[in-house]
Image (cartoon, rainbow, N blue to C red):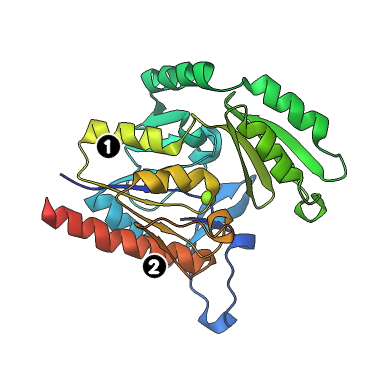
């Protein structure tokens, strides 16, 4: 049996130019591989070292990208190694099996959301009523499952996100602020539920996971071992769990360290099985 390795993408395994945090000398900067192009321009990167290690992880373990991205946004990302057999998109709303959304999984998710949290329309209405055009840049619905705003973060008033999180929490929704994006996501819509489904189908020997944001906390808690970078929402909140390693490294260096940890741990579980 092989291990299941579930990795968040943005700011965990892949990094935009703004998130790379290449703070050392230019002469010592790592060489980068571009893994995403958007509107004809390079958008996301990993270090070449991380890329080579990730290809090896994908060859020995079941590597599952686990992202809040929509399917369309995910399909722009070309990770090293073979195309993953499973991928989690829309924060667990879509389970891609060889690139196609599994209809049974989507129905299961739909039933959970209908039963367990307030409808998307109610949350969206509240977002639009309370967001201020002074700092709101875009408003989007993702896959008819959740909402996100693109905001001018420096202009966001103190307390607005906390107030929103309190209001949303009583309705069964989670709020997560990542870079310039503010997500409102139903609490039953989780990466961990979709990853557990992959583990069930593959009979995985164990789950390794990594993530940087509040939307990754459930995934990390459900894993046997986890890693989080020194940047991001979880690090800023001082979030920790006994089986989750809190790395000091930030930016693309943290991404490389996470893949190195996956490589060491997944290799170990393979020889155990
Ligand atoms: Mg992330």
Please indicate, yes or no, whether residue 77 appears anywhere in the rendered image: no
User: Distance between the Cα atoms at labels 1 and 2?
Assistant: 28 Å
Q: Residues within 10 Å of mark 2 (few under 14, many from 20)?
A: some
Q: Residue at x 79, y 30 (%)?
A: 128
Question: Contact, CB < 8 Å: mark 1 with mark 2?
Answer: no
Does dot 2 land on a helix, a strand or a loop? helix
Q: Residue at x 60, y 76 (%)?
A: 23
Label 2 sits on residue: 49
Residue 134 vs residue 168: left or right?
right
Does dot 1 land on a helix, a strand or a loop? helix
Label 1 sits on residue: 199
Quarter of the image with the N terminus is: top left
Residue 178 vs residue 32: left or right?
right
Q: Residue at x 48, y 46 (%)?
A: 216
**Relative image position of residue 204 (x, y in whole percent):** 22, 41
- Tell me the mark number nearer the camera, choosing from 1 and 2: 1
151, 28: nearer the viewer? 151
Please indicate, yes or no, whether residue 73 appears anywhere in the rendered image: yes
88, 231: nearer the viewer? 231
Decide if ligand 1 comes within 8 Å of the CB at mark 2. Answer: no
Quarter of the rendering containing residue 85: top left
117, 58: nearer the viewer? 117
**Relative image position of residue 87 (x, y in whole percent):** 39, 37
Q: Is residue 178 above or below residue 69?
A: below
Q: Is residue 196 above or below residue 1?
A: above
Q: Is residue 256 above or below residue 65?
A: below
């Amino acid at each position: 049996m092989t291990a299941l390795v579930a990795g968040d993408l943005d700011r965990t395994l892949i990094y935009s130019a703004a998130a790379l945090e290449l703070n050392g000398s230019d002469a010592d900067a790592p060489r980068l591989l571009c893994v995403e192009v958007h509107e004809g321009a390079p958008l996301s990167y990993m270090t070449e070292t991380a890329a080579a290690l990730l290809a090896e992880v994908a060859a020995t373990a079941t590597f599952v990208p686990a992202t809040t991205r929509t399917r369309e946004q995910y399909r722009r990302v070309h990770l090293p190694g073979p195309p993953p057999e499973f991928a989690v998109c829309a924060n667990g709303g879509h389970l891609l099996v060889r690139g196609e959304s599994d209809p049974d999984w989507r129905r299961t998710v739909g039933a959970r959301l209908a039963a367990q949290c307030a409808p998307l329309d109610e949350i969206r209405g509240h977002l639009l009523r309370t967001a201020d055009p002074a700092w709101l840049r875009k408003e989007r619905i993702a896959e008819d499952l959740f909402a996100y705003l693109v905001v001018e973060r420096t202009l966001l008033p103190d307390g607005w996100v906390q107030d929103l999180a309190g209001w949303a929490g009583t309705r069964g929704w989670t709020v997560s602020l990542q870079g310039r994006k503010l997500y409102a996501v139903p609490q039953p819509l989780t990466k961990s539920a979709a990853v557990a489904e992959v583990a069930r189908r593959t009979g995985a020997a164990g789950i390794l996971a990594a993530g940087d944001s509040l939307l990754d906390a459930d995934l990390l808690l459900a894993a046997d071992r986890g890693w989080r970078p020194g940047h991001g929402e979880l690090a800023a909140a001082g979030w920790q769990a006994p089986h989750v390693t809190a790395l000091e490294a930030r930016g693309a260096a943290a991404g490389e360290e996470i893949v190195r940890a996956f490589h060491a741990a997944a290799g170990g579980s393979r020889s155990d099985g």
